[in-house]
Amino acid sequence: MKSREKISKQSIFNFYHSIRFRLVIWFVLILGVVMVIFSGFIFWRQSQDIHSIALGRLNVTIEHTLGQSEAEHGFEQAQNVFSVLPGGTPELNTNVQVDSVVAILATDGSIIQSTGILSTNQIGQLNLPLPGWKGVEQASIPKTAAIQNDRYLFINPAIVQNGVITGYLLVGVPLDPNNQLRRLLVTLVIGNLLTLAIALTGGFWLADQALRPVQTITQTARQIGETDLNRRLHLPGRDELSELGNTFDDMLDRLQAAFMRQKQFTADASHELRTPLTIIELETSRMLSNRRSVDEYERVLRTIQSENKFMIRLVTNLLALARMDAGQMSLKSEPVDLGGLVSEVIERMAPLAKAQGVNLNIGDLTDITITGDRSTLTQMFTNLVENAIKYSAGVANPRVDVSSGKREEADRVLAWVRVQDNGIGIAAEHQARLFDRFYQADSSRTRRANVEGDTNEAESSGTGLGLAIAQWIAHAHHGEIHVESIGGQGSIFEVVLPAGNPVN
Ligand code: ADP
């Protein structure tokens, strides 16, 4: 019960903080303000009109009051009208409109004569600065009059005879006899409320429609687990949210690919380690099952040693890749003489080449300085030269040539190092995946075909990580490794690195 309450509180909280809610509230608020301003303007214009109509009626009532047509005179001139009346107190016309107020006041303000809707008493109760003010006054007539339209316009011109004020005329007409303003107000209020209610519901519906893809994205993101990376949104349309959905799908593609690579990497690494471990286990079990000759013990110990060496190389490479992936490789940025570095590598690899019967040659080495990390660069070239020796040993007249130089490309000076061999080459279908981790194009060359293990072969066999590491190093130096190869005819690996001083 409590948890249900908690959930509903949470969903109310979520609702108030949702974009949907904020969007609609802002929309309705702005619409409300605009409508209030607009309605206020209409109301003001209407009240102005009603006021001027009431002034017109006031004028007409004055004329009626006098019992004669003086239409050409405005009420402002009532004073003159009275002054020309033929002596005595003017007679009030009994035909004045029922809803008007008409009275004649003495100079002290006492009411002499009245007609119209108010009694003499009620006229006395009017909140007016009687007698004799200038212009038009608006006043409410007393509640006792039982009249709906209680706002009246009054005028109070003086009655002048022979230049002497003998009294005052009080004339009042209803400001809004048909209650137009009140009806307009009711209409505007109801209209505004209705419009806002429609805007509120419509706004929620619209926001719901517009934000539905976001809900889909949220739900899908929630459902995606580590093992369920193949879910996609596939949002239809071409709007911003579909674009977001497509970007999300692309990101999932990349994540899935990275996840699969990681999985594959772990599987490959375990597989690579399992083989030497199995060999060691088999050999030691066999040796321990019976007494063996010293020669046999020695042979098995050599096998174990060689498998161990392979595992050390594998684990070292794995560690290097793990550190590269984790960004823990701190590469120095020092000037490196590329030609010098390459000849050092060749010198170090010469004994291996000799042992394998491979003719290792230094071609043209141009003097060129690059900026980079000497030890990782050495590792990269070692991997390439080692591969060239390894994959050419065994062919007729095996030969490896290493050369370097520079060229200009797109306003940059590029240094290149080429390692060329006439070995087994790489078939076109393998070339695209050559730099993938654990990828080995030539399975016949891998020792895994023979679990019994030949000591030398185990020691020299590849881990399938050398090129992946070399490529990482090239990329870390803003360079590239290209390969050109024809199966059975040899390969050329070319490393291209930006030279120290870019061309201006
Ligand atoms: P490995 O340790 O197996 O040599 P690499 O990553 O260094 O692993 O190389 C990957 C694969 O590329 C090798 O297994 C081999 O099939 C192929 N390869 C690399 N260099 C050469 C070369 N110079 N000639 C022929 N094949 C090569």
Image (cartoon, rainbow, N blue to C red):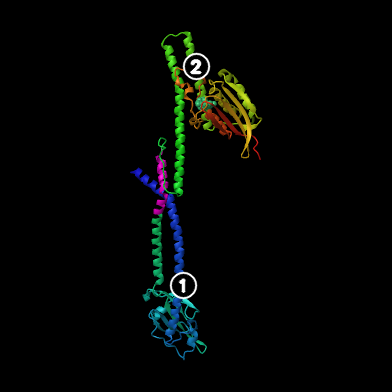
Residue placed furthest toward the bottom: 86
Q: Is residue 257 left or right of residue 358?
A: left
Q: Which residue is mark 1?
A: 48
Which amino acid lies under the numbered mark 2 shown in the image of this protein?
Thr
Any atom of ligand 1 within 8 Å of the CB at mark 2?
no
Residue at 62 percent across and 22 percent down: it is 347
Q: Nearer the viewer, residue 298 or 176?
A: 298
Q: Is residue 284 above or below residue 127?
A: above
- Measure the C-alpha gap from mark 1 to mark 2: 110 Å
Query: Is residue 360 visible to the viewer in this orientation of the structure?
Result: yes
Q: Position of residue 255 (x, y in %)?
A: 46, 37
Q: Quadrant of residue 189?
A: bottom left
Residue at 46 percent across and 46 percent down: it is 243
Q: Which residue is mark 2?
A: 455
Q: State the mark number for residue 449.
A: none
Q: Nearer the viewer, residue 49 or 448?
A: 448
Q: Position of residue 85 (x, y in %)?
A: 47, 89
Give SS at disc 1.
Answer: helix
Image quadrant occupied by the N terminus:
top left
